Amino acid sequence: MKRTILVIDDDIDLVEIIRLTLESEGYGVIDAQNGARGLDLAREKKPDLILLDVMMGEIDEGFQVAYELRKGDNTRDIPIIMLTAVADQTGYAFDPEKDSDFLPVDEYLEKPVSPRRLVDLVRKHLPPTI
Amino acid sequence: MISLLAVEFGGVALPMAAILATVGLLLALNTAYTLRNRRVPAVDIRAELLVVKLQMVLDLLLLTVLLSFSGGIENPFHTIYIIHVLLAGLLFKGSEIRRMALLAGLLFTAEVLGEALGLVPHHHLSSGPEMSHDWRFVSSGLAAFWLVLVGCAYLSASIMRHNRTIKDELVVRQGQLVAADKAKIDFFRYVSHEVKTPVVTAQSAVEAVLAVAGADMAEKPRDLLRRTVERLRQATEIVQGLSDLTRGPLHQGQDVRDVNLNRIVAALLDGQQSLIESRGLRAEARLPAEDVLLRASETMVEKVLGNLISNAVRYNRDGGRLIVELRDLGDAVRVAVTDEGIGIRPEDLGRIFDEFYRTPEAKAASSLGTGLGLPIVKRFLEQMGGEIAVESEPGRGSTFTATLRRT
C-alpha cells in the first residue's frame, strides 16, 4: 500500500515540485494550502508523514499546526518535516536537537528544497514499500 | 579683628589666619565638588551646569575675599578671574559667558575701588610704595583687567561657538549617513525577501524536473537545465548574501554562546577539503593547544570565518598555501587567514568591503562570488565589536585579520 504524505504549504508551485519528486519515488501526496485545512486532513486521512511549511498566512502558523498535531491522539505519532526559510526572516537557524523542547518536529528542511535531500529525509522516516 | 590676626610675612604684615581660612574654604568647596562629581552620576545636563555655575560664583566671591586680604590690585593672582571666564566660555553659551565675565569684573572692580576709596582695608603686599590709592595705577590696572577679561570672554565664546557649529554639522552628517545606511539595508531586506521565494522555488522546480525526468532527456536540454540550476544557485547565493547583510543584529541576541573557535576553524577547513584537494592547496591550521572560547553569536562568527576561508580557497593559486592562524590575545581573539593567490591592488583595498564590488582580478579568477562576502564580514565584525584588517600584495596573496574583542 502506498505511503501517504501530507504537504501543508501555501506555495502551490512548491507543493507541485514536492508532489512530482515524491510521487516519482512511489509515495502518495495530498496537500493543504493552510494550517486549518492541513489539520483537518491530518485527522481525517492519517497520513504517514507530514511536510509542513513554517510560514504560511501567519508568521508562526506552521509552529501552531505542529503543536496541534502533537496534541491529537490520531496525529501525535506522525513524523513531521518542517520546511523552512525562516532563518532568512528571523535570523534564527533551527536545530532539531537543540530546539526539540519547544518545537515538536522531527526534521528541518531548508528551502530551496533539494529533491535528493527531500527524498533522503522522507526515506529516513518512511522507507518506500513498492 | 583681622589686624589682630596679622602675621609678619617676609617683611609684610598680612592677615594670615583669614587668608588661610579663605584658602581652606576654597579647597574644601572644590574638594566637595570633585567628590560629588565622582560619586553622583550625571543625569540631567542642566542640573549639572547649574552646579558648575554655583561653584564658579562661590569661587569668584572667595577669590575676591582672598584678594582683599592680600593686596587687592597689587596681587598678581587677580588673573585667576580670567581663568574662570575662560572656563565659562568652554562650558556655557553666549549670555551665560557675558554674565560670568560681568560678575568677575564687577567683583574685582568693587574690591579695587573699595580699597581706593578707603571703604575696605588695604593689606599692602610689597615693601614698595602703596599703589591701591594711586588713581592712575588703579584706573590703568582696571582698564587692562577689563580689556583682557572682555577679550578672553569674546575669544573663548567665538571658538566654542565655532566648535559647536562644527560638532552640530558632524552630528547632522552622521545622522544622514546612518539614515542612508538604514535605507540601504531596508532596500536589501525588501529585495531579498521578495526575490528569495520565486528564485528558490524556480531552483527547486528545475532540480525536481532534472531528478525525476533528467535521465530520459536528450543531452542538450538536460545540460541547459543543469546550467539553469547553476544560475539559480548564484541568484540564491546573492539573495542569501543580501539577507545575511540585513539580519546581523537579529543573530546577536539569539544564538550567543561560548563559541569554540578551534572547532569552528577546523570544521570550516574540513568543509572546504574537497576544493582544497582539487586545487592542490597546502592548508594549515595554526591553532592554540587549548581551545579558544569567545562569547558571541555562533552564526555570525561562522559566517565571518567561513567567508574569509572560502575566499582564501577561491582566490588562491593552484598549489598555494592557505594558513589560518588563531590567537588568543586575552582581551581579544585574532584570526588571520593568509593565501598565496591573486592579491589585491592598493587602489582596490578601500573598495573590497563595498557591497557588490569585485576586483577585476577576482572576476577573472572566478565567475562565482557575489561581492557580498567581505561586506558581510565587515558588518558582522562591527556589530560584534570587532574589526577587519587586510594586507595584500598583487599576485602574491593576501592576509585578512579578523579581531573579535571579549566584552
Image (spheres, rainbow, N blue to C red):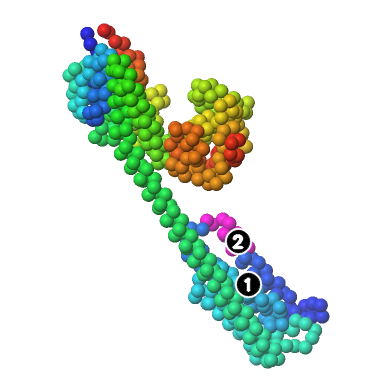
In-front residue for pair B167/B200: B200
* Residue B285 on image: x %, y %: 59, 27
Q: Is residue B242 visible?
A: yes
The answer to whether residue B127 is left or right of residue B110 is right
Q: Is residue B261 visible?
A: no
* Mark with earlier residue (2, 1): 2
Tag of residue B83: 1
Residue A18 shown in magenta: no
Indicate the quadrant where residue A51 lies. Answer: top left
Which image quadrant: the N terminus of chain A? top left
In-front residue for pair B249/B5: B249
Residue B32 shown in magenta: yes
Chain letter belonging to callout 2: B
Q: Is residue B211 above or below residue B172?
A: above
Which image quadrant: the C terminus of chain A? top left
* Residue B122 on image: x %, y %: 70, 85
Most frequent secondary structure within the magenta stretch: helix
Q: Residues within 10 Å of mark 2 (few under 14, many from 20)?
A: few
Check disc 1 and report its element: helix, strand or loop: helix
* Residue B330 on image: x %, y %: 62, 37
Check disc 2 and report its element: helix, strand or loop: helix
Name the residue: 60% across, 59% down. Answer: B35
User: Mark 1 belongs to which amino acid?
Assistant: Ile
The answer to whether residue B213 is left or right of residue B162 is left
Name the residue: 38% across, 38% down. Answer: B243
Indicate the quadrant where residue B280 lies. Answer: top right
The answer to whether residue B96 is left or right of residue A1 is right
Name the residue: 40% across, 23% down. Answer: A97
Q: Which residues are magenta?
A: B31-41
Tag of residue B34: 2
